[in-house]
Amino acid sequence: MINEPPSRRPSSNFFIDAGAFSFVLTIGYDPKTAAPCEVFIAERGKPGELNTALYELGIAISKTLQGEDYERDDTLFDDYPEGFL
């Protein structure tokens, strides 16, 4: 069963300093149940391969939390070198 999250929901931001990398993790919650229903992850201020992978990870986690099946969209990685995935 797919649980559709409401259009506006509370969220929490977590800032993670991992030495050479800094990340922002945002978790959105269902306002009625307070259950987590979506996740966003990004390396702060740095576009590139890592953020693309983190974006995909956030989608995978969010879809799982919402009861959906997840299938990776490999077209997001078309511009990356052979063997990247």
Image (spheres, grey):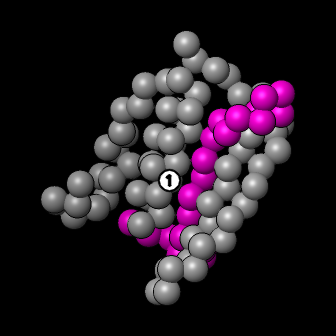
Q: Which of the image's four quarters has the N terminus? A: top right
Q: Nearer the viewer, residue 64 or 45?
A: 64
On screen, residue 45 above or below 41: below
Residue at (81% x, 39% y) in the render: 9
- Judged from this view, the residue extending furthest toward the top is 1
Q: Is residue 16 visible?
A: yes
- Judged from this view, the residue extending furthest toward the bottom is 19
Q: Where is residue 11 shown, x and y percent of the image?
A: 77, 49
| Image label count | 1
On screen, residue 54 above or below 19: above
Q: Where is residue 20 shown, x and y percent of the image?
A: 47, 86
On screen, residue 28 above or below 67: below
Residue at (43% x, 25% y) in the render: 69
Mark 1 crowdedness (10 Å alpha carbons): few <14, some 14-19, many ≥20: some
Q: Secondary structure at mark 1?
A: helix
Residue at (71% x, 35% y) in the render: 35
On screen, residue 52 above or below 24: above
Relative horizontal placement of residue 16, taking residue 68 as reference (left or right): right
The residue stretch that appears in magenta: 30-49
Q: Residue 23: name its quadrant.
A: bottom right
- Please check the rendered image and state whether residue 64 is part of the magenta-colored stretch, yes or no: no
Q: Where is residue 83 shown, x and y percent of the image?
A: 16, 59
Q: Nearer the viewer, residue 38 or 48?
A: 38
Residue at (74% x, 40% y) in the render: 29
